[in-house]
Image (tube, helix red, strand yellow):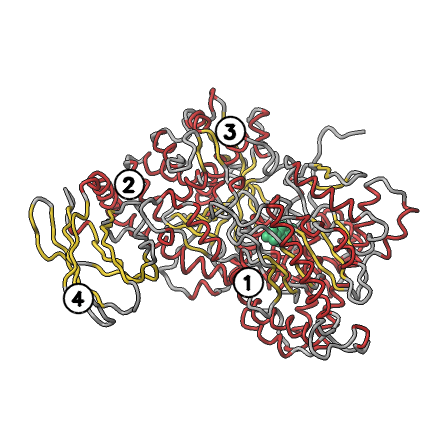
Amino acid sequence: MKAIRRFTVRTVLPESIAPLARLAKNLRWSWHQPTLELFHDLDPQNWEASGHDPIRALGAASRQTLERIAADPELVERIRTLDEGLEHYLSAPRWYQSLGEDAPRSIAYFSPEYGISAVLPQYSGGLGILAGDHLKAASDLGVPLVGVGLLYQAGYFKQSLSRDGWQQETYPVLDPNGLPLTLLREEDGTPSRINLPLPNGRHLMAQIWRADVGRVPLLLLDADVRGNDDAARGITDRLYGGGGDHRLQQELLLGMGGVKALRVFERLTGAPSPEVYHTNEGHAGFLGVERIRELMDTGMGWEEALTVTRASTVFTTHTPVPAGIDRFDQAEVRHFLSAGLAQSVPTDKVLALGAEDYEGGDSGKFNMAVMGLRLAQRANGVAKLHGEVSRQMFSGLWPGFDVSEVPITSVTNGVHVPTWVDPQLTELAKQQFGIASVHDRDWARAYEVPDQELWDLRRRLRSNLIEDVRGRVRAAWLKRGAADAQLGWTDEVLDPDILTIGFARRVPTYKRLTLMLRDPARLKALLLHPTHPVQIVVAGKSHPADEQGKRMIQDLVQFTDDPELRHRIVFLPNYDIAMARTLFPGCDVWLNNPIRPLEASGTSGMKSAINGGLNVSIMDGWWDEMYDGDNGWAIPSANPREGTHTRELYTADQRDDIEASALYDLLENTVAPLFYGQEPPGDAGAAGPSDAPADSLPREWLEMVKHTLAELGPQVSASRMLKDYVNRLYRPASDSGRTAAANQYQAAKELAAWILKVRDGWSGVSVEHVDSIGISDAPQIGDSLTIQAYVSLGSLKPSDVVVEAAYGKVSSTDKLSDHQFLDLQVAEDLGSGRYLYSGTLHIEVAGSFGYTVRVLPEHSGLASKAELGLVANA
Ligand SMILES: *Cc1c(COP(=O)(O)O)cnc(C)c1O
């Protein structure tokens, strides 16, 4: 029989163990080992059955069990102590509280997905995991962040395999009442709601769930409410499920509805209004439109409202892959706006924000990343290389400027160490050094750990993984239709003494899941090598609409099905956080082979590194800046900057051949011999592989592991990332926002009026003529040169602009490089808006030297020279 209705009956906890409710509800348990151990110890069997889910475990506990716990003084005391610890964690001052009064009072963080714990499956991959780690690190550091997102009824799909290795998707529906969530309610107990008008008189309402991620509240909008029609209820059905309209409505709800949800939250809790709005990728970009609407509803003009909003908005772009950017039809966006989503805001202005009105753009499209950049005064990519690639990619928005001047900086991603470091590594640190958890400053002590201890730890982590893998391989085969009796071999899958390589991530084409299959015979030889074999664990979900990704998975699965190889290479279905937490620590090598430079950052290699795994990776994303020659290996790229040259050196096929071959060489000749403590072949006096004494430790390998822990630990941690965001983006954004808002938005009004004036007058600005004085025919280092520039400012004044000389080395094509700038000063007012500017510079480099002069708008309210996209070059 099938139930027609379902309720989750709430457990009533006996008084003495009542604090368990809060310990279960606050997601801090997901990275707090002592709390996890408590939930395990309360009832180990129940804990396993719950899938390590405290709410589910408590819900399933019988009255008898609860009474037994309540009567056990030792458990009661542990619960009390942990609850006190949580209270202290939630309220004591932390790093952020030492920053002083002028740090932002509150920061709103918007993301379409959050990967916090396996019990809240609201993520598809790296973007969501990063968002989860961002919230957790903010909590640890006391950063007053509020997260905003959507609650998807089925989250992302669960992956299984058909008999022939084709990805199958299922969408189990979640019951929010059984999740670590609390519904926001009005004083009279009715659920709080936000409401967005839709075309044809329809409405989209949403209720708001609150998750507590340590100190950080996360608000999740849920459209599955009575009063919505079926179509509206379905808007939050799945993460990245639909296309077109469905996706657009999700994003309108996230952005515009998200700001409304924040206002409800502020009203109910008295929380301060955010002073900074940070959008994690472009999906939440409509939050800026909603903020402009709020301001224009009070009578403010468009330009002023835009100025205020931009000042306090931060936009992070996450992908150089065009397919990763949301684009809608302009007409579609107009259709929804016409329903009155933002009545006081001129629709054409909103449409212009997302218009691809630059070379190579499509005038019919509305581009969410472009809107993100136009609505945020500050923007960043997620690794140094990705910053460069993003400046190139979006340079069309700043014509007339060098790519290096495009105002997109970078903050390299990081990972939340307490979530991703294995508890056994923490335990080792505790035994060796008496520290309870590993902080950024502690990593350097890795060098002090005895080799034997470290090697034993690595083996334990590998064994853990292997045990988990065997269970998963068996379960996967049962699902694929095999009989239990046929699966004895799964108990022998993988070997705890063999070099273990991991590869797990989403399966978009550019990540090249199947690069390792390029030459199947070579891979087979590596797997079955007589003295230094490798074994490989692979996992990853393909987007349900991506046939090519599914075919790659199938190719890989079919390779792993070979009875000759299946004990050395496995594909594990349904990659998720729970699997990841065993997988990263258990792998000796983490493999990453995207097409450079399409991996914006990548974070899984970081999770491997903090557990003592060594990276073997294409020089892309975070690895491009953190590989130091001793912390892993770089796979060379055939085409160093794919997509950014007009012509590649090699075709895609040649490229994959070259890079796969480099990978095989690396694994076979360098990585594997080192792991087994063998001299790489070719070294003088190399001993035969079998000469190494059986009990000797691979000292060089362990040295690399220690070096990785010591050097990468602090660099890849999310606390480093959060501090970078606070110092480099949040604080400047809140300063700009406060300045703009002071005295009834006086500065914003002035700045907006000035921007209009400058835009109007810019066609009258030009550099008419430039002279240089004092230069001989044979200039020498140390000579000075006086530049005189005749500049027309039209209707603008010298106080509106800066006239600068850029000077330095020039190439044979007259391109300046390594150049410096010199501000020129007004030497003479020539009348009719014309001025003579001059300045003297010193020649400090030998070789070909050149200079140019340009005029830029200048105002203290601008965050970068290129911000308005206006420049008059000589
Ligand atoms: C870390 C992680 C990712 C992201 O991996 P990338 O290397 O950044 O692609 C995806 N899924 C899960 C479950 C993860 O833990």
Q: Which residue is mark 1?
A: 717
Q: Indicate the amino acid at tag 2.
A: Glu
Q: CA distance from mark 2 to mark 4?
A: 51 Å
Along the viewing direction, whichever of 421 and 455 lies nearer the viewer:
455
Disc number placed over residue 204 in the picture, else none: 3
Residue placed most toward the observer, 752 or 704: 704
Earlier sequence position, callout 2 versus callout 3: 3
Q: CA distance from mark 1 to mark 2?
A: 39 Å
Residue 333 percent location from the top left of the image: 44, 29
Mark 3 lies within 8 Å of ligand 1 (Cβ measured): no
Q: Secondary structure at mark 2?
A: helix
Callout 3 environment at 10 Å: few (<14), some (14 to 19), or many (20+)? many
What kind of residue is marked 3? Leu
- Asked if one can make out residue 116 in the rendered structure from this viewpoint, the answer is no
Compare marks 3 and 4 and give the one earlier in the sequence.
3
| Cα separation between marks 3 and 4 | 73 Å
SS for dot 3? strand
Tag shown at residue 776 = 4
Cα separation between marks 3 and 1:
39 Å
Q: Are marks 3 and 1 in contact (CB under 8 Å)?
A: no
Decide which of tag 3 and tag 1 comes sooner along the chain. 3
CA gap, disc 1 and disc 4: 55 Å
Q: Which mark is residue 799?
A: none
Q: Nearer the viewer, mark 3 or mark 1?
A: 1
N-term mark: 1 or 2: 2
Viewer-nearest residue: 300 or 283? 283
Amino acid beneath label 4: Ser
Q: State the residue position of label 2.
A: 304
Image depth: mark 3 or mark 4 in front: 4
Q: Is residue 152 above or below residue 58?
A: above
Eyeballing the image, is 871 above or below 631? above
